[in-house]
Amino acid sequence: MTIDSLVSEIRKKRSFLCVGLDTDLTKIPEHLLIEDDPVFAFNKAIIDATHTYCVAYKPNIAFYEAQGVNGWRSLEKTIGYLNHYYPEIFTIADAKRGDIGNTAHQYARAFFEDLDFNSITVAPYMGKDSVEPFLTYEGKFTILLALTSNPGASDFQVSEKADESLFKSVLKTSKGYTNSQRLMYVVGATKTEYINAIREIVPDSFLLIPGIGAQGGDLKAVCESAMTEKVGILINSSRGIIYASRNADFAEAAAEQAHALQEEMASFLAN
């Protein structure tokens, strides 16, 4: 996967939507629980119903790890299904890994080689030796946590206790990493007041932006402040799409929500 191929898919579908596959056994329709693999059955139905309207999928790895070996098998089947039937779609392992040296190399192997994701989210707190092992993979992208949408982000990321906010330091420092052209960044949709400052530091990098919908982020405000000539953003929606219905029509309801967001995004691409 390259940036140009991602941008081409965005232009073709007139969408920069990423669907988060935060699949929770306690929230999926009850009729799926009789399936041999309810999580994969749910994911497959969601993917088949929404792929026309999105350019990326983002399984949240915690939801699969919580199910033990069965959850990992569901994850393997999900990414395998995406890579086989929808190889043009960008895949994100929302794993938020962040460890040094050999450990980081093993995480990179697991998600880039074994599972064959296009990208992974990584926490930068331990510095470049926790990030650069991921950046050695050509055609793969590392999405650094820069400024997240949760309330606790203010504890460190935007703290005024230091001369410079931590998120700015992360952005500036990461630009010096080897293969930094393979970096993207997580920026929460609820932090639009900081996006101009972020774009001053990383004017062309892609931003993965969660927090639209259930978390209160505003799509219009995000697009107006974050979009670039090559679009430069992926907007993630999870619960608002995949749990639009708990009934037998769950996939159709998910498609309706994804389509509505896609149409809204198309209007910004037209400008």
Image: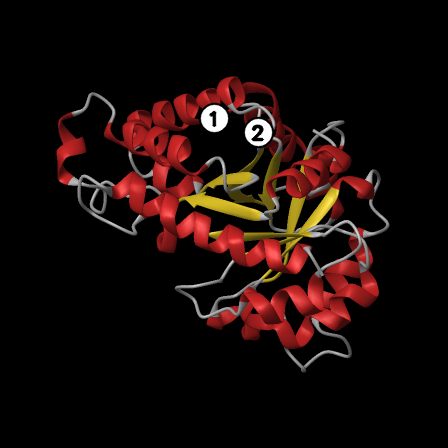
Which secondary structure lies at badge 1? helix
Give the residue type that dot 1 points to. Answer: Ile
Disc tally is 2
- Quadrant of residue 209 within the rendered picture: bottom right
Give the answer, above or below, for where 35 lies relative to 195: above
Residue assigned mark 1:
79
Tell me the residue at 49%/25% (across/down): 82
Quarter of the image with the N terminus is: top right
Q: Nearer the viewer, residue 17 or 206?
A: 17
Left or right of 137 on screen, residue 178: right
Tell me the residue at 73%/28% (across/down): 139
Q: Which mark is residue 117?
A: 2
Give the residue type that dot 2 points to. Answer: Phe
What is the spatial separation of the Cα atoms under label 1 and label 2, in whole angstroms?
Answer: 7 Å
Marked residue nearer the N-terminal end (1 or 2): 1
- Quadrant of residue 110 within the rendered picture: top right
Tell me the residue at 68%/68% (across/down): 224
Q: Are marks 1 and 2 in contact (CB under 8 Å)?
A: yes
Mark 2 packing: few (<14 Cα in 10 Å), some, or many (20+)? many
Left or right of 204 on screen, residue 237: left
Quarter of the image with the C terminus is: bottom right
Image coordinates for residue 188, horizontal then vertical, percent: 57, 63
Q: Nearer the viewer, residue 178 or 84?
A: 84
Residue 33 can be seen, yes or no:
yes
Image coordinates for residue 61, horizontal then vertical, percent: 43, 39
Which secondary structure lies at badge 2? loop
